[in-house]
Amino acid sequence: MPDRLASILLGPAGRLYGIVMSIRNALYDRGILKAWRSPVPVVSVGNITTGGTGKTPLVDWIIRFYHAHGRKTAIISRGYGRQTKGARLVSDGSSILLGSRDAGDEIAMLAARNPSAIVIVAEKRQEGVELLMREFAGRMPDVIVLDDAFQHRAIARDLDIVVINAQEPFGGKRMLPAGRLREPLRGLQRADIFIQNKITDEKRAATIIDVLKQTGKPVVLSRIMPGNLVPVSDEPQRPLRVLAFAGIGAPEGFLHSLGEAGIEVIASRFFRDHQPYTIESVRSIVADSNRLGLTPVTTEKDWFRIREESTLAATLERAGCRYLPIEPDLFEGRAMLESMLIALRMGDAPDS
């Protein structure tokens, strides 16, 4: 559907959604709706738009920051795209108990990358904390990191971090479903600190910074730093002319990261964010790669989703598939974020 037609047809639904979110936020702001407070300090990492902000690598960065400072952590997320319901323990900090099918691909990846972190999925974050309290009484973590929780106001947080995609910062300023905004922009006032992520054009970034600084809150600047391609098998590797494929919210960011890594992308296949792969779609990717003499390359998150399906994984392994890990590069304002994280674990919440 063309964007203009979609805007006309979905605009009324977007305006209604915005009204509902404004009323809900007002009820919390005035204390009519109460947020439940965890016995453990809480950091929330979220965004104001749907998908593609690079939030998951930043959650990973925060977990590793705390671990480097000797602090035990727990991650609680709704586990988008999982096939389970309710509060479920994904990792107890020593063993991974659920894979991407039951935990969600992003959370499965975070659990694998942070094996000493406790990881829980729960639609209602309070239920996740209550599970944590039951299962880990006497050995609770020092801090809880809520993944994707800016709009989940039913649980109080001590530090509210909002990630903004520099490529598409405010979702066209249209509310869901007409645009990508999850709530009206005035909700940004609730944030304690912003991370403007995926910066590739510093002049464009400066314009967005001016908007964010009107809130009076600090802004950290970040870009995506690609790592080295990781082979998913021991199959002989083809030259690095690649077919890029992924099911993510902002595929242009993946293409940019591949370019930054010096990888020549000849063809691409993209799917909806979190869309399940089928044997037909994977065979089609491999067939196109073979026909063009290309190496199939995907994101780390996508590979975590694929690898649990043995037939899909084996098909890509035989084709010499690789995935691209990424890290955030907090190149300006990092010290401010670190100081706020340290103050939190010392028991000092930031001023709202």
Image (cartoon, rainbow, N blue to C red):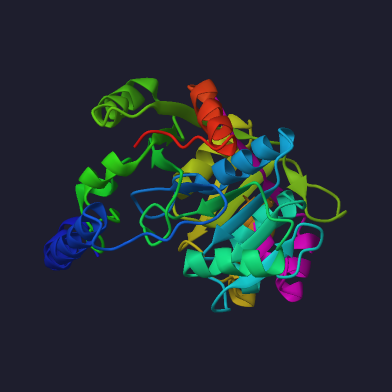
Q: Whole-percent x and y of residue 78?
A: 51, 65
Task: Residue 16: name its quadrant.
Answer: bottom left
Residue 316 lies in the magenta stretch: yes
- Frontmost residue, 93 versus 263: 93
Residue at 77 percent of width and 64 percent of height: 96
- Frontmost residue, 16 versus 5: 16
Residue 187 lies in the magenta stretch: no
Seen in the image, is 196 located left or right of residue 317?
left
Magenta residues span 303-331
Quadrant of the frame with the C terminus: top left
Seen in the image, is 57 located left or right of residue 22?
right
The answer to whether residue 140 shows anywhere in this view is yes
Residue at 55 percent of width and 41 percent of height: 58
Task: Residue 10: name its quadrant.
Answer: bottom left
The answer to whether residue 282 shows anywhere in this view is no
Examine the rendered structure and indicate whether residue 106 appears above or below residue 333.
below
Q: Whole-percent x and y of residue 160?
A: 42, 43
Q: Whole-percent x and y of residue 102?
A: 63, 74
Numbered circles on residues, count:
0
- Frontmost residue, 304 versus 106: 106
Seen in the image, is 343 located left or right of residue 8?
right
Seen in the image, is 281 located left or right of residue 30?
right
- Frontmost residue, 135 versus 46: 135
Examine the rendered structure and indicate whether residue 27 appears above or below residue 311.
above
Q: Whole-percent x and y of residue 326?
A: 62, 40
Residue at 54 percent of width and 21 percent of height: 335
Quadrant of the frame with the N terminus: bottom left
Task: Residue 34: name its quadrant.
Answer: bottom left
